[in-house]
Amino acid sequence: MKNWRAFFGLPVLLAGQALAWDHITEPGSLKAAIQANEHTLVACELSGTSHEKNQALETEWTKIQENEEGSQVVSVDCSQTPKACEELGVSSFPAIRLYHRDGRLDRYRGPRKTAAIQGYLRRALRPTVSHVTKKNETSFLLADDVVFVAYFAHSDSNLRERFAAVANKYRDRFSFGLSSDNDGKRQESILTCHNNPDQLQRSIAELSTADSLEGFVKLCATPLIPELTRRNEVSFYQSGKSLVHYFVHNDKQRDEYVTEIRPLAKKYEEYLHFTTTDADEYADAVAMMGLEPSVGGLSVQNPRNGDVFPYPGRQRLTAAVVEAFLVDIIQGRVQPWTGEHGQRGGQGGGGHDEL
Ligand SMILES: *[C@@H]1O[C@H](CO)[C@@H](O)[C@H](O)[C@H]1NC(C)=O
């Protein structure tokens, strides 16, 4: 493929174009690679099946291979080397796995995106709990999206064990460190957390109960503007806060909105949940929030009384525009949606059980 492009004078890489898989084709080479390296990240695809997913991963994988020069990142096409894949026990495709030389294997379950997979690889290469000193603390705090650093009193060996257990459970998603600085003199144990995308820092000193560590990890890791899905919706409706929904059709739209609205979400954190939702996957929910599913947009929902306020405007949703709309709702200048607007999709307003 690359050759005929060069032949016709086309640039080998056009912007946004999928790069080609560079599969291991010798059945023995995969095994050899896994045995030769401390860690090997393997993508297993089955050409001819789930075409779209394969192609999406192919683009991301090529980027990862470029970025991770020197580390072992490989791929196999299990329709060409079925035996090798059989030995690895891969049964659903595409699959991403991290093989350790000592025989351990981790299955990657996160989003199939370059940044997420690379983050996962970096975490895997670190110890479960990194040793942090005053000298390298600052760089460690920026080494991942969500970073925990513990400052424990020396006597607290039980706490150290519990921290290690929680770190082990979540090490594939977040980074954990233990500061040795000054620890002989420390009287009180503290756990801190840096959520870098949201620029939020939290700390907790009440660490005595079994759930306190894990509760803190979950609190700190939840993004300021999370993605609402069927799996996590309950926790948002339970809090009694109103929801500011934003229904999107793609990741770019979501990223732009989150970047723009983050300061607003921080300002109103105590009273409102700002969320994003996939408008295509949850088209019924878009309609129930008084919006046109093919368009999406913003809608405010009060789960306690069922009121819904779809944003009627068409201008870009800047923080100022959204805040003005929220103030209008609070001051009673906007009436809740009656569920009967001709142009707006859906019937029946207020309910949230479909989301
Ligand atoms: C920080 O420095 C210490 C002492 O040199 C070292 O043992 C540790 O691995 C370093 N930690 C990180 C995260 O680089």
Image: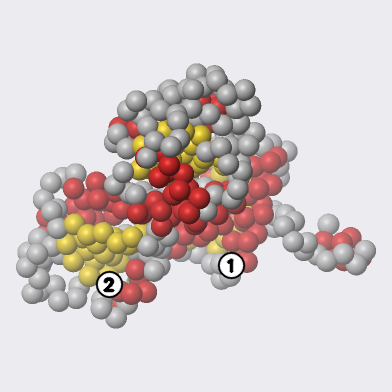
Label 1 beta carbon less than 8 Å to ligand 1:
no
- Give the residue at x 61% y 31%: 292
Across and down, in percent, residue 155 comes to 7, 64
Disc 2 C-beta below 8 A from ligand 1: yes
In this rendering, is residue 292 above or below 35? above
Residue designated by label 1:
67
Q: Which labelled disc corresponds to residue 164? A: none
Three-letter amino acid code at the position of disc 1: Asn
Q: Determine the quadrant in which ligand 1 lies.
A: bottom left
Q: Is any part of residue 228 visible from this angle?
A: no
Quadrant housing residue 328: top left
Instruction: Give the CA separation, mark 2 to mark 1.
Output: 26 Å
Question: Which residue is under mark 2?
Answer: 132
Q: Please, what secondary structure does the residue beneath circle 1 have? A: helix
- Say above or below: 128 vs 79: below
Secondary structure found at label 2 = strand
The answer to which quarter of the image holds residue 18 is bottom right
Question: Quick one: 310 or 328, which is closer to the camera?
Answer: 328
Q: What residue type is labelled 2?
A: Val
Please report whichever mark, 2 or 1, sits nearer to the chain's N-terminal start: 1
For image coordinates 37% across by 40% down, the residue present is 331
Of residues 49 and 105, the one nearer the viewer is 49
Pinpoint residue 345: horizontal percent, then vertical percent. 60, 25
Q: Which coloring applies here? A: secondary structure
Residue 133 seen: yes
Residue occupying the point 39% across, 69% down: 142
Residue 112 sits above or below residue 68 on the image: above
Dots 2, 1 in contact, CB < 8 A: no
The single residue placed furthest to the bottom in the displayed view is: 135
**Measured from the top left, where is residue 312 in percent x and y?**
56, 37
Quadrant where the image shows the N terminus: bottom right
